[in-house]
Every structure is written in structure tokens, then in C-alpha cells.
Image: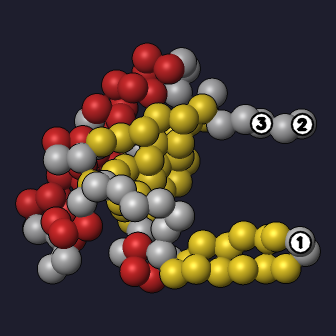
């Protein structure tokens, strides 16, 4: 089953880039779970985001994310796991889990 592991943290921690040690930990995580990781990326700050809505057939855009939160979506991994327990175990090893939170969501696959 495929799961999306969404990495949330405060953007303030990333303002000046990532520490070398944290990047190394992400590299180690990537090696450990290379067979399960199907994809993933870090995201640019929410200040670069645009939210799109369509109302009455008209596109409307606003700067930034839809809601104010203490933690922002900073990146994600798409993984293949046998079940939710395995996905949770993988999520717990993501270095960002030590500072923020990891949301684990199963994908809906439409045939």
C-alpha cells in the first residue's frame, strides 16, 4: 500500500537553510528506506505558495497556504509499506519527527 508521509515543522528552523548534520540524517534515512521510498522532496517556504480556489467559475488566488498554523508543510515522502504499522515505523525515523510532526496518509488508488 502507498502512503504519503507529510513533514510538518516551523519554518523558522529552515530560515537559514538546513544544518549539515540534519542533511546527513536525511541522507541516512534515504539509504535505510531506499526500497520503500518512491519519491519525495523538500518544499520552498509558504511565502512562495499560492492557494487557488474556483468560485462561480472564476479562479481566485491568494498568497500563502490556506490556513494559519504553527507548523508548515515542509516536505514529503511517498512510500510503499505493507500496512499502516510499517508506514508509521518509517515515519518515526524521518529526522523531522524529532522537531515537528509527520502526518501519515494512505493514498486512494483509482483504477
Q: Where's residue 52, x and y in %?
A: 68, 73
Disc 1 and disc 2 in contact, CB within 8 angstroms? no
Disc 2 and disc 3 in contact, CB within 8 angstroms? yes
Q: Nearer the viewer, residue 39 or 103?
A: 103
Q: Which residue is mark 3?
A: 109
Residue at x-position 53% and y-position 42%? 4
Disc 3 and disc 1 in contact, CB within 8 angstroms? no
Examine the rendering and report whether any part of residue 35 can be seen. Answer: no
Q: Secondary structure at mark 1?
A: loop
Q: Where's residue 12, x and y in %?
A: 18, 69
Check the picture and name the quadrant holding the C terminus.
top right
For this view, does 50 lie left or right of residue 35? right
Q: Nearer the viewer, residue 96 or 71?
A: 71
Query: Which of labels 1 and 2 is toward the front?
Result: 1
For marks 3 and 1, give the CA distance. 29 Å
Q: Which residue is mark 1?
A: 56
Q: Secondary structure at mark 2?
A: loop
Q: Where's residue 89, x and y in %?
A: 34, 25
Q: Which residue is mark 2?
A: 111
Check the picture and name the quadrant holding the N terminus.
top right
Amino acid at each position: 500500500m502507498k502512503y504519503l508521509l507529510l513533514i510538518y515543522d516551523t519554518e523558522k528552523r529552515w530560515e537559514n537553510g538546513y544544518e549539515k548534520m540534519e542533511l546527513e540524517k536525511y541522507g541516512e534515512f534515504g539509504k535505510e528506506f531506499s526500497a520503500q521510498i518512491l519519491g519525495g522532496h523538500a518544499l520552498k517556504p509558504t511565502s512562495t505558495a499560492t492557494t487557488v480556489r474556483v468560485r462561480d467559475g472564476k479562479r481566485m488566488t491568494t498568497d500563502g497556504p490556506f490556513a494559519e498554523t504553527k507548523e508548515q508543510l515542509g516536505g514529503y515522502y511517498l512510500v510503499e509499506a505493507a500496512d499502516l504499522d510499517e508506514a508509521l515505523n518509517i515515519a518515526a525515523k524521518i529526522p523531522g519527527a524529532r522537531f515537528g510532526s509527520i502526518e501519515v496518509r494512505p493514498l486512494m488508488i483509482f483504477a
